[in-house]
Image (cartoon, rainbow, N blue to C red):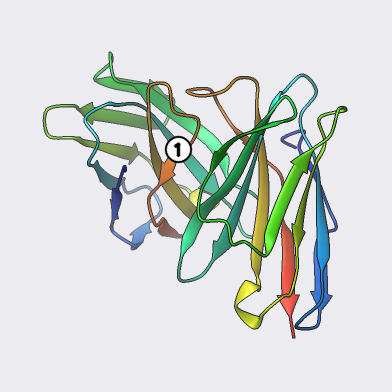
Amino acid sequence: GENVEQHPSTLSVQEGDSAVIKCTYSDSASNYFPWYKQELGKGPQLIIDIRSNVGEKKDQRIAVTLNKTAKHFSLHITETQPEDSAVYFCAAMRGGSYIPTFGRGTSLIVHP
Amino acid sequence: DSGVTQTPKHLITATGQRVTLRCSPRSGDLSVYWYQQSLDQGLQFLIQYYNGEERAKGNILERFSAQQFPDLHSELNLSSLELGDSALYFCASSLGQGNTEAFFGQGTRLTVV
């Protein structure tokens, strides 16, 4: 089955810095890669996703890149703000599958 | 607000007991997924239903069962509870069967004492 590795497990940055979270996946048939943000006491919320026919996608301060050959994808957050502090999960899903496989999560802490 | 409603928010129960967690999906969503989140295991997929039928099973224990009713709400039943079952249980829903955005509820925090 699919295996998703996520690094780092904890990331501490100063407000205004950039943050990068990296994930690798094992199943070359995976073609959908969502990223979720989980704030304390809440459920995960989708913040951006990318499909395998695209190499990069941007939405304001967040962007995701995908390298299908290397089987890795990354989340980039620029100009970080304290409200970006949360746990971020990457996931991978293969075509025809119903279930995303999640990474273990990255706890992002943005210091004011 | 994701539109997915889970009840109760918190549940404290004793070992050996049985509990039922309830989930109402977003209006129009046919798929419901159940996940368990614990500190050491991350988000673990338990089971998925699509339009009332079981579609996929993950690491769900035999002591656990679920169903999706005709009105599309779902229940997760946990029986013979053990201390290790203490966790956050999330329900998510999506429109289709795969490769579509899943919306998560706020979770039920289960504490087994």
Task: Tell me the quarter of the image containing the N terminus of chain A.
Answer: top left
Please name whichever residue, B31 or A85, is drawn nearer the observer in this view of the structure. Answer: B31
Please name whichever residue, B82 or B103, is drawn nearer the observer in this view of the structure. Answer: B82
Q: Is residue A16 left or right of residue B108?
A: left
Residue at 37 percent across and 50 percent down: it is A103
Q: Is residue B36 above or below residue A56?
A: below
Chain letter, disc 1 residue? A
Q: Is residue A32 left or right of residue B31?
A: left
Residue B112: give x, y in percent of width and height.
Answer: 73, 79
Q: Is residue B82 above or below residue B102?
A: below
Q: Is residue B106 visible?
A: no
| Corner quadrant of residue B38 | bottom right
Please name whichever residue, B46 or B8, is drawn nearer the observer in this view of the structure. Answer: B46
Q: Which residue is mark 1?
A: A100
Residue B28: give x, y in percent of width and height.
Answer: 77, 19
Residue A108: give x, y in percent of width and height.
Answer: 42, 57
Q: Is residue A26 left or right of residue A41?
A: left
Residue A32: give x, y in percent of width and height.
Answer: 38, 26
Residue at 47 percent across and 48 percent down: it is A81
Q: Secondary structure at mark 1?
A: loop
Residue at 84 percent across and 34 percent down: it is B69
Q: Is residue A37 above or below residue B101?
A: below
Bin the neighbour count of mark 1 within 10 Å (Cα to Cα): few under 14, some 14-19, many 20 and up.
many
| Corner quadrant of residue B55 | top right
Please name whichever residue, A27 or A52, is drawn nearer the observer in this view of the structure. Answer: A27
Q: Is residue B100 above or below residue A35?
A: above
Residue type (three-letter) at the residue carrying disc 1: Pro
| Extreme residue in the left direction | A69
Q: Is residue B93 visible?
A: yes
Q: How many marks?
A: 1
